[in-house]
Image (cartoon, rainbow, N blue to C red):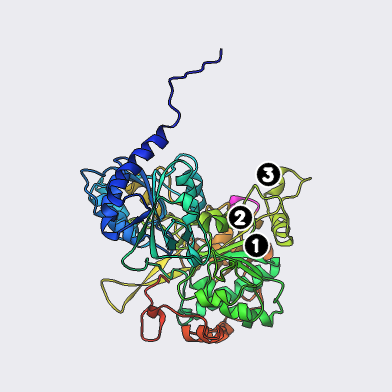
Amino acid sequence: MINHDTSRTWDTIKRDTDERLAAAAKIVGSGKVVAAEDAVALLEAVIRPFDRVNIEGDNQKQADFLAQCLCAVDPAKVHDLHMVQSVLTLPEHLDVFEKGIAKKLDFSFSGPQSGRIAELLGAGKLDLGAIHTYLELYGRYFLDLTPRVALVVADAADREGNLYTGFSTEDTPTIVEATKFRQGIVVVQVNEIVDRLPRVDIPADFVDFIVKSPRPFYIEPLFTRDPAKITDARVLTAMMTIKGIYAEYGIQNLNHGVGYDTAAIELLLPTYGEELGLKGKICTNWILNPHPTLIPAIESGWVKSVHSFGGELGMERYVAARPDVFFIGPDGSMRSNRCMSQVAGHYAIDAFVGATLQIDPYGNSSTATATKVAGFGGAPNMGCDSRGRRHSTAAWLKAGAEVGTQTSAIGPDLHRGRRLVVQILNTVAKIRDKKNPGQFKEIPAFVEHLDAEKLMKNANLPIEPVMIYGDDLTHIVTEQGIAYLHRCRDIEERRAAIRSVAGKTPVGLQGSEEECRRMRELGIVKTPADLGIDAATATRDRLAAKNIMELVEWSGGLYDPPAKFLPGKEDSSRQ
């Protein structure tokens, strides 16, 4: 029997939104433009206790003024919020938990706030929903984690509320669409309000309020690496990666993670890659932020296209001057899009190459430590084999044909390709000893148990925060050689391959010369000598640019390095 309940109300969310907007109108009037001094009162009017709130904390750009305003609301009026945001970078992102304004958190990456998250969890001031990959969290924005209120950031707005998100668009369109089309409220921090925008990235219909910030929004040059800090050891692993993986599989469509290991690869393409005759055969199509270290490869004709997750501070003029390479809008500037880059990174690339801190005997890797809840960012989304992929490339098919367990998984008659997932690391990392300035501690990268296991217990997480699982990993590259893990026929063979490249670590010391020789005979492990690489020739002299100023020269003066990377300044980025 069909039941037509005429008494039911179907627009309760919209009615609630209208009530909030009416409360806000008493503060801002009938328009969308809000004075900076009224921003705190606006937030108190449109946010209710227990709301799900997104504040735009991206990999690079930050709605920093709105973050400060949220910290300044009266906890008696606004409390127990459920924060959903991809990145926690600013102290204010966690100050709201200290003050009781927020209680629950779902996020992707925390970077400099990772230690503080662990402290707040231990103190009972923060309840953790889950740690996500970027694309996973974006998906939940449209399912069960839709923001009730979104606090986002754009370069500029006009007085009607149209937005120009510009070079570093990043997460903004994804957040706004999820919020607004679920009758949510969108508040935008902008650098300026103008009569006419260079282009409209988000229409005014999607925007409720705009606030001109007292200062430009903060943006972090997260992917900038100074070539001067690339060591000979990293040159060696980069040479092995180029010859033993990129050349062997003909990798053209790829992503590089952040770090000096991948920066070294980028700077070797115009030199070592040229020696090997690989131009046009590898590294042509990229899903990548505008890495300054890619400039020499672009200028040398290696790169056909780059689509970017976000911008990179100082690269604006260079990118705009290379529209054949980057995705440039009709206004002449790039529009990045983290969600679409993550989609491409999951389905369209043939190789993900990045670094890690720890690998266990089975190949599971993690960047977590026992006292820091760092999250993952996009690495697990790209550092996995996309089982939904159906288009073929030569690299994908070649890797799939080598998978040692393929027949037992799908039978002998069918074909399936394989994403290459590569982790680069030194077997032993040297880190500065905080207790003894000038001293360094040696930390093994290959361990019996990941710190992620301790963190799960310390932070009361439901599972270990593993970045890449061993069965997704195809290659490990260390100064000892390359382990081709996807060629292994069982878990014991995989463990033997890992031991063979693990050096003098607790894992590597369990291996033997005989075991390593057998792995080399099977083609599962290759040393630098097996690849025809003389380690003595792996020096910084091979880099196309050896410091930041040489990158500026390569760019024809179009690259404007952030001040902290200029001569005489110290780069505080992670190594």
Q: What span is colored magenta in the figure?
A: 489-493
Q: Nearer the viewer, residue 507 or 284?
A: 284
> Farthest right residue?
413
Q: Are marks 1 and 2 in contact (CB under 8 Å)?
A: yes
Residue positioned 60% across, 63% down in the render: 483
Assign the N terminus to one quadrant of the image. top right
Q: How crowded is mark 1: few (under 14 residues within 10 Å), some or many (20 or more)?
A: many
Residue 428, position as x, y percentages in the image: 44, 69
Q: How crowded is mark 3: few (under 14 residues within 10 Å), some or many (20 or more)?
A: few
Q: Which amino acid does label 2 sit on?
A: Glu
* Circle 2 SS class: helix
Q: Nearer the viewer, residue 304 or 68?
A: 68
Mark earlier in primary sequence (1, 2): 2
Q: What residue type is labelled 3?
A: Ala
Residue 163, position as x, y percentages in the image: 47, 59
Q: How far apart are marks 2 and 3 (CA)?
A: 17 Å
Task: Give the answer, above or below, for where 502 lies relative to 388.
Answer: below
Mark earlier in primary sequence (2, 3): 3
The disc label shown at residue 524, or none: 1
The disc label shown at residue 409, or none: 3
Q: Nearer the viewer, residue 409 or 150?
A: 150
- Residue identifier under label 2: 493
Lateral position of residue 16 relative to residue 420, left or right: left
Q: How far apart are marks 1 and 2 (CA)?
A: 9 Å
Query: Is 491 part of what is drawn in magenta?
Result: yes
Assign the C terminus to one quadrant of the image. bottom left
Residue positioned 28% across, 71% down in the render: 434
> Farthest top residue?
1
Lateral position of residue 290 relative to residue 403, left or right: left
